[in-house]
Image: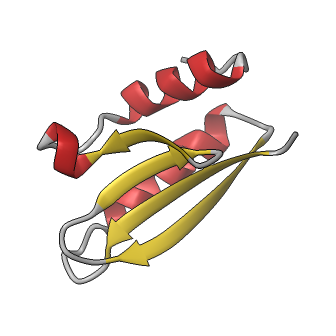
């Protein structure tokens, strides 16, 4: 089954650089994961793996550390990364 990581980021807030940085790390560390970026608003920065919420800026009151997301992906998928 294909694995898809979706990053929804607030475009008006300027979060695109954070989303691109996370996408680059995921694509560098995992071969079998597709990354989708989706524009949002109102301060959103959510990360989903196959429609399961891995991280929400609203819930955590902070941005994710990329290593934190890479570890969660590895735990959820059983895929090994270079972390």
Residue in the picture at 11% in, 43% down: 61
Q: Quadrant of residue 76?
A: top right
Q: Is residue 62 above or below residue 15?
A: above
Q: Residue at x 83, y 44 (%)?
A: 2
Q: What coloring was used for the rendering?
A: secondary structure
Residue 79 drawn above or below residue 17: above
Question: Residue drawn 15% across and 43% down?
Answer: 62
Can you say whether 60 is above or below 16 in the image? above
Q: Position of residue 10 (x, y in %)?
A: 29, 72
Q: Position of residue 64 (x, y in %)?
A: 29, 39
Residue located farthest toward the bottom when viewing the structure as drawn: 12
Residue at 28%, 67% (x, y): give it.
15
Which residue reaches farthest right?
1
Horizontal side, residue 46 vs residue 49: left or right = left
Numbered label tally: 0
| Nearer-the-camera pick, 32 or 47 | 47
Which of these two is toward me, 16 or 52?
A: 52
Image quadrant in which the N terminus is located? top right
Given residues 2 and 24, the one toward you in this image is: 2
Image quadrant of residue 45?
A: bottom left
- Left or right, residue 16 beside residue 78: left
* Above or below 2: residue 13: below
The quadrant of the image that shows the C terminus is top right
Query: How far from the left and from the top, in percent, is residue 66?
Result: 39, 36
Expressed as whole percent of the image width and height from the top left, the position of residue 13 reads 19, 75
């Amino acid at each position: 089954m294909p694995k898809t990581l979706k990053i929804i980021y607030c475009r008006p807030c300027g979060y695109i650089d954070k989303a691109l940085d996370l996408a680059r790390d995921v694509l560098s560390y995992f071969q079998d994961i597709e990354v989708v970026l989706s524009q949002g608003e109102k301060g959103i920065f959510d990360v989903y793996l196959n429609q399961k919420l891995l991280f929400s800026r609203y819930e955590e009151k902070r941005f994710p550390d990329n290593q934190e997301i890479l570890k969660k992906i590895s735990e959820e998928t059983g895929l090994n990364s270079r972390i």
